[in-house]
Image (cartoon, rainbow, N blue to C red):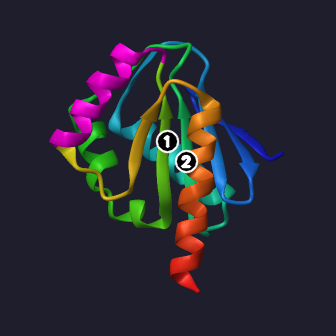
């Protein structure tokens, strides 16, 4: 398993198409940190399309406005098949789903309360993308 770090996060390549990002502590993500995480993911995957699994289940992570806009509208996001985000509770999932309705990311994005369900969805997204590309 390939692993790297940023100032706030640990990034692990957990499969041929998936990078998992775990935050070491509660943090406020600036645009600069989000760009650093995105670039490290892209480098880890050697420029190939991938799925992004972010684990917010045990830390509180918040974003600057610029970071949220970048994540929703970043043209390099087209290199990602899907973004799955693990949140700590159903209440957090409902708040996050509201965020999706307001920001409409370029990449299919869903929030989950379990890593197992997130990985099942990622597997399905990879399968659908693979079928579409063939």
Measured as percent of width and height from the top left, residue 65 is found at 21, 33
Q: Residue 63: in sight, yes or no?
A: no
Question: Where are the magenta residues, as a range?
Answer: 88-102
- Residue displayed at 49% across by 42% down: 84
Q: Is residue 120 above or below residue 65?
A: below
- Magenta stretch contains residue 101: yes
Q: Give percent across and percent down for residue 25.
A: 56, 13
Viewport quadrant of the N terminus: top right
Magenta segment's dominant SS is: helix
Q: Which mark is residue 107?
A: none
Dot 2: few (<14), some (14–19), or many (≥20) neighbours within 10 Å?
A: some
Q: Secondary structure at mark 2?
A: helix
Name the spot of residue 132 as percent of width and height, x first. 51, 79
Q: Residue drawn 29% across and 33% down?
A: 97
> From the viewer's perspective, is the residue at label 2 or at label 1 nearer?
2
Labelled disc at residue 84? 1
Locate residue 27: give its quadrant: top left
Q: Quadrant of the C terminus?
A: bottom right
Q: Residues within 10 Å of mark 1 (few under 14, many from 20)?
A: many
For image coordinates 75% across by 52% down, the residue present is 15
Residue 49 appearing in the image: yes
> Outermost residue, left direction?
102
| 42 left or right, relative to 1 | left
């Amino acid at each position: 398993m390939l692993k790297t770090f940023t100032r706030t996060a640990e990034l692990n390549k957990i499969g041929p198409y998936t990078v998992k990002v775990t935050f070491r502590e509660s943090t406020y993500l600036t645009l600069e940190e989000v760009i650093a995480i995105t670039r490290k993911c892209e480098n880890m995957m050697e420029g190939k399309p991938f799925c992004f699994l972010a684990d917010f289940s045990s830390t509180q992570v918040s974003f600057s406005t610029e970071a949220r806009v970048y994540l929703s509208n970043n043209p390099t996001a087209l290199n990602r098949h899907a973004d799955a985000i693990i949140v700590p509770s159903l209440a957090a999932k409902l708040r996050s789903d509201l965020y999706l309705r307001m920001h409409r990311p370029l990449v299919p994005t869903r929030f989950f309360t379990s890593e197992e369900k997130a990985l099942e969805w990622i597997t399905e997204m990879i399968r659908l993308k693979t079928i579409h590309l063939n």
